[in-house]
């Protein structure tokens, strides 16, 4: 984690356009919540996450610690995700697997960048990791205990709507769940066509995504 923190902290620069947008919108949303101030625009109409979740938190931190503080918050989220990944993998497999997974994740380019990027991505990654950890951690408890994973999962979806693509559609969908199944690049070939191209890995992937994908296409 020290290496991960160091790699993220070595990145620097002025506020990126998205960072400025979410922090500024957070101040507007906070003023709306506290004082009823009218919003200049409807942020919910085009934001990729609920404007009253991450932007408001970012605005509160920005008021006290500035952009650096908001970026440090992202770093804490990513460090938390690394710790949860280690714990989850260790419980599923063993200590060596947990250390390997955490080590690999900590030096990924996306991990380093998100750890120093004041947007909702780091928060969404942390909440999704927390939800997955809760599912694994409650494996020996009562069936109802797995519901503890629901609140962080719901928050992850609210913080960044695109998270649902990761959880329900690992193969990727380009964001359009309304397209016919036959258009999807990961769709199972019909009839005899393409049977020779289906291997065990493809079948496992189709199995993993079948429940969420078919439900989404039905709508």
Image: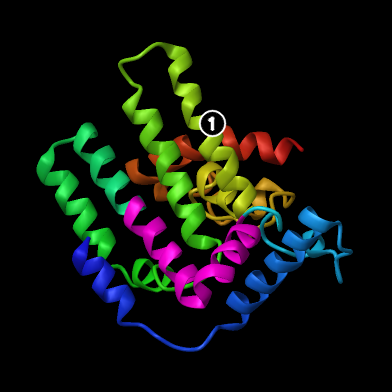
Instruction: Relative to 16, say whether 173 is above or below.
Output: above
Tell me where the magenta segment starts and ends, as one range: 54-80
Q: Residue at x 65, y 59 (%)?
A: 56
**Quadrant in the rendering for residue 33:** bottom right
Viewer-proximal residue among 1 and 203: 1
Position of 173 relative to 208 (above/below): below
What is the x, y in percent for residue 184? 61, 54
Q: Secondary structure at mark 1?
A: helix
Task: Tell me what residue is drawn at x 46 percent, y 35 percent.
Answer: 207
> Colour scheme used in the picture?
rainbow
Specify whether residue 63 is painted magenta. Answer: yes
Q: Quadrant of residue 219?
A: top right
Residue projecting furthest to the left: 96
Left or right? Give the position of 5 relative to 78.
Answer: left
Q: Percent x, y for residue 173?
A: 60, 55
**Residue 84 visible from this viewpoint:** yes
Task: Report x, y in % for residue 113.
Answer: 40, 73
Q: Taking the image as drawn, is residue 190 in sight?
A: no
Residue 9 in the image: above or below residue 178: below
In the picture of the structure, the residue carrying the numbered disc 1 is 150
Q: Quadrant of the N terminus?
A: bottom left
């Amino acid at each position: 984690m020290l290496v991960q923190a160091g790699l993220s902290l070595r990145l620097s620069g002025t506020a990126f356009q998205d960072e400025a947008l979410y922090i500024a919108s957070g101040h507007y949303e906070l003023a709306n919540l506290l004082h009823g101030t009218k919003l200049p625009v409807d942020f919910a109409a085009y934001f990729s996450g609920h404007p009253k979740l991450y932007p408001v938190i970012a605005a509160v931190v920005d008021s006290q610690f500035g952009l650096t503080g908001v970026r440090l918050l992202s770093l804490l989220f990513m460090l938390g995700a690394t710790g949860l990944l280690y714990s989850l993998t260790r419980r599923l497999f063993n200590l060596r697997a947990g250390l390997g997974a955490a080590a690999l994740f900590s030096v990924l380019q996306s991990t380093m960048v998100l750890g120093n990027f004041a947007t909702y991505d780091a928060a969404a990654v942390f909440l999704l990791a927390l939800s997955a950890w809760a599912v694994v951690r409650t494996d020996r408890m009562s069936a109802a205990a797995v519901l503890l994973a629901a609140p962080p999962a719901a928050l992850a979806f609210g913080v960044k709507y695109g998270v649902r693509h990761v959880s329900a559609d690992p193969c990727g969908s380009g964001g359009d769940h309304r397209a016919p199944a036959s258009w999807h690049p990961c769709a199972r070939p019909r009839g005899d066509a393409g049977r020779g191209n289906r291997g065990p890995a493809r079948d496992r992937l189709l199995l993993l995504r079948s429940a969420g994908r078919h439900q989404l296409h039905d709508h």
